[in-house]
Amino acid sequence: MQFRTLDELKELCTESQQTIGELMLQEQCRESGRSRENEFKKMQDYYEIMKEAVERGLHEDTTSRSGLTGGDARRISAYRGSEETCLGGHASQAMIYALAVSEVNASMGRIIATPTAGSCGILPGVLISAQQRFGWSDEHMVSGLFAAGAIGYIIANNSFISGAEGGCQAEVGSAIGMAAGAMVEMRGGSPAMVVHAVGLALKNSLGLICDPVAGLVEIPCIVRNGLGAVTALAAADMALAGVRSVIPSDEVVQVMLEVGSAMPAAHRETALGGLAQTPSGKRVIEELKKGRI
């Protein structure tokens, strides 16, 4: 890739007067040796899988094999249909879709890791709800996914996207940054605004530990996906309004690396700390061992 940092990405797009999504598509073609049509179609297929996961999560049984999770997306959807939500309609929809996809993952359904399976609901939750809201074409959405991919590429190569390496800030945090940046670009924001959105989003998840109860990507992972979608929308609105990340976004990525490296092993996907080791978390583990759940 021609870029290694968010600042380099911003400068390249500004100089060439291209969107981040367009630049990333060109870079992908250059690295893979495949045509633009081929790479675009591949990403479009991924987007279709995301939409299918939303539909499955809303209309099929998503009870996980452990029996611990499933059906929360539908519960909130029903609540949204009967009550005025605290969040409001659009943010609630993004949250519902994010939960739906994450529940499909927990029930062994097909998802797209964005950037990981543990954070798979955030990007589809934000993008698919936005497409329905604004009437955007699938082509526009695919361009947004390429923009998200560029952001994820930079985070992965300068910090972490794995909870086992850097905690949940690396998985859910990265996904929030990717979704926020993509949303800004799809709304017509400048490359600089996109980069600020990433920094604003990542700052709000610094230090988030990875503490899956019983080692399963269910509790608290699914709920964090739903809340992450809301955070991504908030960060996008801040950036579009002109709010800047006072600490440059590349420096925020470096802080995520530092914090993740200093994080105890118990808080990095081992299920040896955090929520996994609460009395209730331990009880879940024992019940699973006995086959009672």
Image (tube, grey):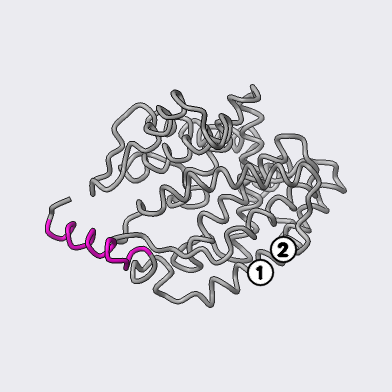
Quick check: is 130 in the magenta stretch? Answer: no
**Which residue is under mark 2?**
250
User: Considering depth in this image, is 148 or 132 the residue closer to the camera?
Assistant: 132
Q: Is residue 26 left or right of residue 293?
A: right
CA distance separating discs 1 and 2 = 6 Å
Q: Horizontal and vertical percent for residue 65?
A: 23, 46
What is the three-letter code of the residue carrying label 2?
Answer: Asp
Residue 52 placement (x, y as % from top left)? 43, 30
Q: Which residue is mark 1?
A: 254
Comparing 3 with 137, the one in front is 137
Q: How many marks?
A: 2
The residue positioned 31% from the left and 40% from the top of the image is: 70
Tell me the tag on residue 110: none
Is 42 on the left or on the right of 36, as rendered? left
Q: For the stretch drawn in magenta, what is the main secondary structure?
A: helix
Q: Is residue 52 left or right of residue 38?
A: left
- What x and y, as percent, mark residue 128? 55, 31
Q: Position of residue 42 (x, y in %)?
A: 54, 36
Residue depicted at 81% across the width and 51% down the height = 12
Span of residues in magenta = 275-290
Task: Evaluate if marks 1 and 2 touch, with contact meaning CB atoms under 8 Å apart.
Answer: yes
Inspect the magenta stretch and tell me whether residue 288 lies in it: yes
SS state under label 2? helix
| SS label for mark 1 | helix
Q: Quadrant of residue 212?
A: bottom left
Q: Amino acid at mark 1?
A: Gln
In which quarter of the view is residue 17 placed? top right
Residue depicted at x 39% and y 63%: 211
Quadrant assignment, res 186: top right
